[in-house]
Structures are given as structure tokens and as C-alpha cells.
Image (spheres, rainbow, N blue to C red):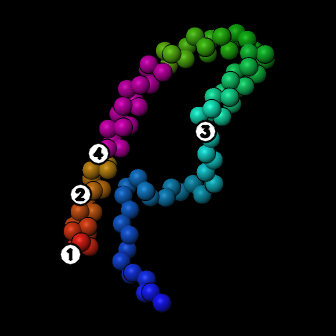
Amino acid sequence: MKRQSSRRHWKTFSDRQTWNHAPAIHVSLVEAFVIKLLLFCILLIVCWPVALLALVLYPFVWLVLLPFRLVGIVVHGAFELIAALFLLPARVLRAV
């Protein structure tokens, strides 16, 4: 019988588990598009002025939120760099 390695596997910052213990639901791009289209059709039937207003305002809202998305990407990269720097000594010692 092989002996299990007692070395601990170091995870990167993005591999850590979140506090949300709900099961993950994976939806393909096509399924997500169909769900959004159905919700829009329901909104169009129930309250068509709001649906048309949402259709017109969506590109402007996307443009306003674009800088926040870019800042999020940069902050995520900075945290990945800090995590890699903290875990570097452990990786070096593990390789020895």
C-alpha cells in the first residue's frame, strides 16, 4: 500500500472556498441567453414601457459600469500577486 503524502497542497488566492455553501449552478451561455430573453419577454408583456426603457438604457449602464469592472480585474490581479509573494517561500521549501 502506498503511503499518502503528508505535504499540504497550497492553494492560490482564487482557489479558496467561499463562505457560500450553496451548490454551484453552471449555466451555459446559450441557456443564460434564453433565460434573459424569456425574462425580457415577460417584462415586455407585463409592463412594456419599462422593458423599452431598459432596452434603451442598458448600453449606457454598461458603459458606466465598465471602469468598475476594470478596477475589479486589477484588484484581483494585485491580490493574486500578493498571495504568490507570500506563498513563494513555502513553494521554494517544498521544492527542496
Q: Main secondary structure of the magenta part?
A: helix
Q: Earlier in the sequence, mark 1 or mark 3?
A: 3
Vertical position of residue 96 compared to residue 55: above or below: below
Of circles 1 and 2, the one toward us is 1
Vertical position of residue 91 compared to residue 81: above or below: below
On the image, numbered disc 3 is attached to which residue? 28
Q: Earlier in the sequence, mark 4 or mark 1?
A: 4
Callout 4 touching callout 1 (CB < 8 Å): no
Residue shown at 61%/51% (left/top)?
24
Q: Amino acid at mark 4?
A: Ala
On the image, numbered disc 1 is attached to which residue? 96
- Crowding at mark 1 (Cα within 10 Å: few <14, some 14-19, many 20+): few
Q: Which residues are magenta?
A: 62-78
Q: Position of residue 85 (x, y in %)?
A: 23, 57
Which image quarter: residue 83?
bottom left
Q: Is residue 52 left or right of residue 13?
A: right
Of circles 3 and 4, the one toward us is 3
Q: Secondary structure at mark 3?
A: loop
Distance between the Cα atoms at labels 3 and 2?
35 Å
Q: Specify whether residue 58 is painted magenta.
A: no
Q: Amino acid at mark 3?
A: Ser
On the image, numbered disc 4 is attached to which residue? 78
Vertical position of residue 76 compared to residue 61: above or below: below
Q: Position of residue 84 (x, y in %)?
A: 27, 56
Q: Amino acid at mark 1?
A: Val
Q: Secondary structure at mark 2?
A: helix
Of residues 8 and 30, the one drawn nearer to the viewer in this rendering: 30
On the image, numbered disc 2 is attached to which residue? 85
- Crowding at mark 2 (Cα within 10 Å: few <14, some 14-19, many 20+): few
Callout 2 touching callout 4 (CB < 8 Å): no
Callout 1 touching callout 2 (CB < 8 Å): no
